[in-house]
Amino acid sequence: METSSKFVWNAKDPNLLLLFGGVLALLVVASVIGAILKRTAKTESTERVVANLNSRTRAWWKMSAVFAFTLLVGKTGSLVLFTLLSFLALREYITLVPTRRGDHRTLFWTFFIITPLQYYLIGINWYGFFAVLIPAFAFVFIPARIALAGDTEHFLERAAKIQFGLMICAYCLSHAPALLILRIPNYEGHGAVLLLYLVLVDQISDVLQYVWGKLLGRHKIAPNVSPNKTWEGFVGGVATATLLGALLSWATPFTRWQSAGMSFAITLMGFLGGLVMSAIKRDAGVKDFGAIIEGHGGILDRIDSLCFAAPVFFHLVRYFFVR
Amino acid sequence: MSTSIHPLARLIAAFARGLSGVQVRWQGCAPELRQRVYFANHTSHLDFVVLWSALPKELRARTRPVAAKDYWQSGFRSYLAQRVFRAVLVERGAAARTAHEEHLHSSGFAVIDQMAEAMGERDSLIFFPEGTRGTGETVGEFKSGLYHLAKRRPDVELIPAYLENLNRILPKGEIVPVPLVSELTFGPPVQLAESENKHKFLERARDAVCALRRKGSE
């Protein structure tokens, strides 16, 4: 059966193409608005905001292109992309964590063995091992390997921080491409559409929370953690992204109401993900995890919401729609 | 000596750049095509490659590392150092041993002669004045080579640089690197003042490197 083979060319899936068409239209609109704003910007501070907006839009074009390409190539393409994302995110995270000389070999395992293996398990459809590799096996392996290295200073802290990074950057994120191996009755072979749905709702919710916050934001939710997160942005973003998700139900195995519920869960988890990762950044005394994406910061700044939304969405789908 | 870059050097540089995700900042100086000595803290085998690969291409072809002869003179290491990166191989410690005999034209100065000669009219050098790789927690005392070179070639700009996190990517004694994000900061040129003695100058040069450190400096 074609759906279980490793290499599936997804470009024939009409829903996938339609959704990407929608993304393309959004990007065009955003670019046009950006160009108009650039002309009408008068003060220096608005110019700076508009310039940042436009560089974000440019980065969105590139990110969408890469995602579209890998998704259309099929399961292998998506797995390669997400392995790389995990790798880069983990690298940004570990850079901020004060590991010690004795952690070197442990980190080698974390980056070069455990993370790729997590995605390989999706590749060979081994769900049982995929689900426990990091929470069970890596969990006992990491402190053991650090203990073998012999340095006990801040031992628990080091082990915990490495494990946490691996959970967020590799384990949680890997649940997004793991949607490709779910066998949903009457929806076989359309896992790529579901993955796109998750990423689309999650990322649009980020953008809408930002936009609503900029337009109406007044009451801060957690000023010590993230000064940009306001109740107005949160409510507006979650409501509009949920509405959009409901309108996309035609591409999913969900009914309209189910799709609204799923999108609500995605946006809520996405918000919490952004909040948690902000707290980590504040604790480490940095603004962004990196500077790899123009206008956005690091990879982890872009996918923090996805890291939280992916496992919850995956298990909601698996529990309610598989079998 | 040709100015073209060895293909293997390009490959290694690209790999090192990717692995170290190095973010380069130029503070108080810009990449320019002129004779310079870049001097930096030393914690990893990757230091030179990362610093070298961070330079614009035109500069790279004209920038050579200074490396310890005892470590880099045999087998594949020798090939890497001499053929691939055109390293200037010098006797380690010799300069320091004889530094107090400044009036004598001893072997310490042979090293300085060698470096000055290797630079010629055109090339720049990458130099690690600590002489050996440290742990990364502190920057070690500078050996006197930098002072003598500054005296010998007053026309050459001395650029301090600080490499952050490379000790975590590939620490001394490890073979496999771990891919973290590193930072490289170039600082404003340091000049040897007319009446400045060796100790003071080396102290100041070391401070110039430490000042580029982003994390709380001790």
Image (tube, helix red, strand yellow):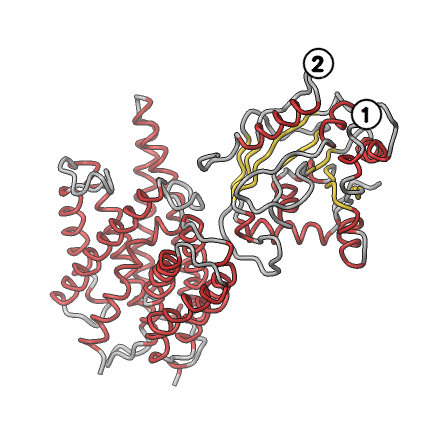
The answer to whether B195 is drawn above or below residue B76 in the figure is above
Residue sitting nearer the eye, A56 or A41: A56
The answer to whether A29 is drawn above or below residue A153 in the figure is above
Residue sitting nearer the eye, A215 or A308: A308
Q: Which subunit holds the residue at mark 2?
A: B
Residue at far bottom of view: A1
Question: Which residue position is annotated with label 1?
Answer: B102
3D distance between C-alphas at marks 2 and 1:
16 Å
* Occupied quadrant, residue A130: bottom left
Residue sitting nearer the eye, A129 or B201: B201
2 or 1: tag closer to the N-terminus: 1
Disc 1 secondary structure class? loop
**Residue located 29% across and 55% down the image:** A22
Residue at far left of view: A257
The answer to whether A312 is drawn above or below residue B205 in the figure is below
**Residue located 69% across and 41% down the image:** B131
Question: Which residue position is annotated with label 2?
Answer: B195
Residue A180 relative to residue B18: left or right: left
Residue A151 relative to residue A244: left or right: right
Give, as a three-letter code, the residue at label 1. Answer: Glu
Disc 2 secondary structure class? loop
* Occupied quadrant, residue A127: bottom left
Have a look at marks 2 and 1 and say if they share a chain. yes
Q: Which subunit holds the residue at mark 1?
A: B
| Of labels 2 and 1, the one closer to you | 1
For label 2, count other residues whose C-alpha is less than 10 Å away and answer few (under 14), some (14-19) or many (20+).
few
Give, as a three-letter code, the residue at label 2. Answer: Ser
Where is residue A236 drawn, in percent x and y? 15, 46
